[in-house]
Image: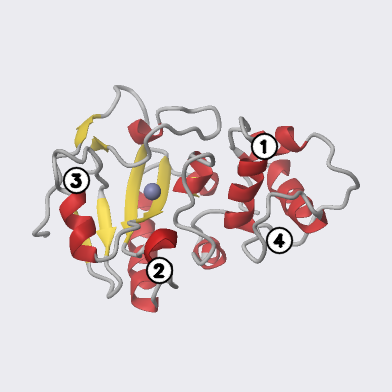
Amino acid sequence: MSLYRSPNFGPRPADTPIDMLVIHYTGMPTAEAALARLCDPAAQVGAHYVIDEDGAVHALIDEAMRAWHAGEAFWRGETDVNGRSVGIELVNPGHEFGYRPFPEAQMAALIALCRDIVARHPIPPANVVGHSDVAPRRKSDPGELFDWPRLAAAGLGRWPVGTAAGRGEGDAAGLLAAVGYETVDLQKTVMAFQRHFRPALIDGILDGETLGRLRMLAGDPDDKG
Ligand SMILES: [Zn+2]
């Protein structure tokens, strides 16, 4: 199936469901460099799948194994994100090497792969997330050019429809935590939220639109939104 295999995985914890899907970008200048790194035992980073910009899907690690893609992470109370997730890397140079839109062929391949994965594992829409969502202090991938609304329209992940009324910031940390975020650094968490759910402006400021979308999603994390 794939010319590439990664040694960067271990066993999954026993009796733990695979109930998360984490999307990344590779953040390297070329696909070849990214695949080489993800298959290098010294790098100690790996992902189950890599999708090239032309839509080619490389299966690097068996889904039954715990791939080392998320690092230190948190989502909806869980800290062993690698233990319960499938990790997908999208080839893209990333913010460091010339961030650019994800091509149509790559997005179509991603949606087909995600649909296949969620059909085989109990992964709710609230647990289809980006690396920046589960590691807001360290990561910004897949970034603000990623088309989360398209995924949500395909039944993958959530997207806020409309905004919930309300004044003032209220308990911003509580709302972010209700969606799933850690809130150790509130400004960075707001930026991660914006990168995913209000990508037009990522400034870490809880303006009315950001807060409205946050309230929509915090209302019921298991709602498709
Ligand atoms: Zn990542």
Q: Give the number of the disc on residue 61.
A: 3
Q: Which residue is drawn at 59% across and 37% down?
A: 181
Q: Please name which of the two marks, 3 or 1, marks the residue nearer to the observer.
A: 1
In the picture, the quarter occupied by the C terminus is bottom right
The amino acid on which the numbered mark 1 sits, given as a three-letter code, is Leu
Q: Is residue 60 visible?
A: no
Q: Residue at x 45, y 27 (%)?
A: 79
Q: In this view, does 37 lie to the left or right of 182?
A: left
Q: Give the number of the disc on residue 161.
A: 4
Query: Viewer-proximal residue, 128 or 52?
Result: 52
- The alpha-carbon separation of the residues under discs 3 and 1 comes to 34 Å
- The alpha-carbon separation of the residues under discs 2 and 1 comes to 27 Å
Q: Please name which of the two marks, 2 or 3, marks the residue nearer to the observer.
A: 2
In the picture, the quarter occupied by the N terminus is bottom left
Badge 3: how crowded within 10 Å, few (<14), some, or many (20+)? many
Q: Name the residue under label 2.
A: 98
Instruction: Indicate the position of residue 89 as horizontal and vertical percent values.
Output: 32, 55
The amino acid on which the numbered mark 2 sits, given as a three-letter code, is Gly
Q: Earlier in the sequence, mark 3 or mark 4?
A: 3
Q: Give the number of the disc on residue 150.
A: none
- The alpha-carbon separation of the residues under discs 3 and 4 comes to 35 Å
Q: Which of marks 4 and 1 is nearer the N terminus?
A: 4
Instruction: Indicate the position of residue 21 as horizontal and vertical percent values.
Output: 41, 46
The amino acid on which the numbered mark 3 sits, given as a three-letter code, is Ile
Q: Name the residue under label 1.
A: 186
- The answer to whether the residues at label 2 and label 4 have Cβ atoms under 8 Å apart is no
- The answer to whether the residues at label 2 and label 1 have Cβ atoms under 8 Å apart is no
